[in-house]
Image (tube, rainbow, N blue to C red):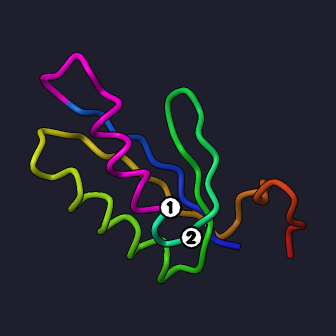
Amino acid sequence: MPSCQFSLYPLGTGNLSPVIDKALNELKDMGLSYEMGNMSTVFYGSSEEIFTALKRMYEAVSMHPVVMNFTVSNACPVSPKGKEKS
């Protein structure tokens, strides 16, 4: 299953959570499985879902100064929790 690891860095604010929450709400709205870490979030879906989610997340936060980095893979060894790699 394809996956995407992304990091979002809001700039010029001491309170990062509201901007990051806007991006994560897009994943929730799409019903995609994701796992949050300290510095990045990994989510899973089809290639179309992943690129649609990236676009939606970026558009949701683009009114703020942000840096968004991501890596998309169809070969990562980690599957979503509770799902076997196929």
Q: CA distance from mark 1 to mark 2?
A: 5 Å
Let me know if residue 16 is in the magenta part. yes
Q: Is 58 displayed left or right of 31 in the figure? A: left
The quadrant of the rendering that contains the N terminus is bottom right
Relative to the observer, which residue lies in front, 49 or 28?
28
> Which residues fall within the magenta stretch?
11-27
The three-letter amino acid code for the residue at tag 1 is Lys
The mark found on residue 46 in the picture is none
Q: Is 74 displayed left or right of 27 in the figure? A: right
Q: Residue at x 76, y 58 (%)?
A: 80
Percent coordinates x, y for residue 44 in the rendering: 62, 65
Mark 1 residue crowding within 10 angstroms, few (<14) / some (14–19) / many (20+):
few
Percent coordinates x, y for residue 73 in the rendering: 59, 64
Circle count: 2
Relative to the observer, which residue lies in front, 19 or 50?
19
**Residue 84 placement: quadrant:** bottom right
Outermost top residue: 14
Q: Residue at x 30, y 46 (%)?
A: 68
Mark 2 element type: loop
Image position of 11 with respect to 2: above or below: above
The quadrant of the rendering that contains the C terminus is bottom right
Q: Residue at x 24, y 40 (%)?
A: 67
Magenta span: predominant SS is helix
Q: Is 66 displayed left or right of 32 in the figure? A: left
Percent coordinates x, y for residue 35 in the rendering: 64, 46
Contact (Cβ within 8 Å) of mark 1 with mark 2: yes
The mark found on residue 31 in the picture is 2
Image position of 64 with respect to 44: above or below: above
Relative to the observer, which residue lies in front, 59 or 7?
59
Let me know if residue 80 is in the magenta part. no
The three-letter amino acid code for the residue at tag 2 is Gly
